[in-house]
Image (cartoon, rainbow, N blue to C red):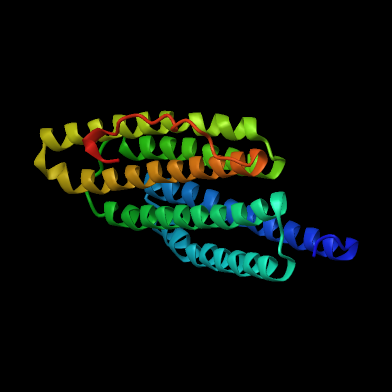
């Protein structure tokens, strides 16, 4: 069907539109992660509520992207690179939706933590980890836009750094809990927040792998570098 020049032009225009939606969705997720971490650090409950409410727009975009991609497959029957692009867009949208959920969960726990005694330095450490993961996500999406397999491979390698940051935070929280049992509740919430951020890093890596698939036609053969996570949590 795409052999007809007019149909091909329409398909290209529709594909550009759905990729623009992906980038809009990515921008919302990056902002949600950053704002949720900031809300935790500054105890800004209004900002935390904005993150929670903003997740609706992220979910709606995923639904729109999936609907449009299904329409493109049904009406245009794309093949080869065009089909890989549509499938990659759908998988990226799914990863971004999960990242949005993790940011929303971070915001929820930030509000709960405001009522507890603070753990010295924890919020700032969480915010630094969120910043690192946010950059990883941004670079993965930039690699998608530019079809840059090299940048995607670099993002994939950086996931180990995120794992190491998570491990350091896990040990820090464990120390606080052992020193004073009154810290247990707050440290458990902080641990789940750190785990959510680590999961966002995993999804950024998945997006990078999809970019490699898109540009080369195959996923990486070797397993992604992964630090052994503290606490035995994969």
Image-based side of 9 in relation to 78, left or right = right
Residue 154 x/y as whole percent: 56, 29
Relative to 121, does residue 118 appear above or below in the rendering? below
Query: What is the number of callouts on the image?
Result: 0
Q: Can residue 142 be seen in this view?
A: no
Q: Looking at the figure, which quarter contains the C terminus?
A: top left
Residue 17 x/y as whole percent: 73, 60
Q: Name the residue furthest right.
A: 5
Image quadrant where residue 187 sits: top left
Image-based side of 100 in relation to 231, left or right = right
Between residues 160 and 28, which one lies in front from this camera angle? 160
Image-based side of 168 in relation to 146, left or right = left
Residue 173 x/y as whole percent: 23, 36
Q: Looking at the figure, which quarter contains the N terminus?
A: bottom right
What residue appears at the point 65 percent right and 57 percent down from the top-left corner? 86
Residue 3 x/y as whole percent: 85, 60
Between residues 41 and 205, which one lies in front from this camera angle? 205
Relative to 175, does residue 36 appear above or below in the rendering? below
What residue appears at the point 29 percent right and 34 percent down from the top-left corner? 229
Image quadrant where residue 144 sits: top right
What residue appears at the point 74 percent right and 66 percent down from the top-left corner? 76
Relative to 14, does residue 172 appear above or below in the rendering? above
């Amino acid at each position: 069907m795409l052999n007809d020049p007019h149909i091909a032009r329409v398909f290209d225009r529709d594909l550009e539109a759905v990729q623009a939606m992906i980038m809009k969705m990515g921008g919302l997720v990056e902002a949600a992660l950053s704002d949720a971490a900031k809300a935790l650090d500054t105890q800004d409950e209004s900002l935390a509520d904005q993150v929670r409410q903003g997740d609706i727009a992220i979910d709606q975009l995923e639904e729109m992207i999936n609907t449009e991609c299904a329409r493109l497959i049904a009406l245009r029957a794309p093949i080869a690179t065009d089909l890989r692009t549509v499938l990659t867009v759908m998988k990226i949208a799914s990863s971004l939706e999960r990242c949005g959920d993790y940011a929303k969960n971070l915001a929820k726990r930030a509000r709960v933590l405001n009522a507890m005694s603070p753990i010295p330095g924890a919020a700032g450490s969480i915010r630094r980890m969120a910043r690192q993961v946010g950059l990883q996500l941004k670079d993965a999406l930039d690699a998608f836009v530019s079809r840059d397999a090299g940048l995607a491979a670099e993002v994939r390698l950086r996931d180990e750094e995120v794992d190491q940051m998570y491990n350091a935070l896990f040990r820090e929280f464990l120390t606080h809990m052992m020193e004073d049992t009154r810290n247990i509740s707050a440290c458990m919430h902080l641990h789940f927040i750190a785990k959510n951020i680590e999961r966002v890093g995993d999804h950024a890596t998945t997006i990078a792998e999809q970019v490699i698939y898109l540009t080369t036609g195959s996923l990486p053969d070797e397993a992604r570098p992964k630090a052994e996570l503290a606490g035995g949590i994969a």
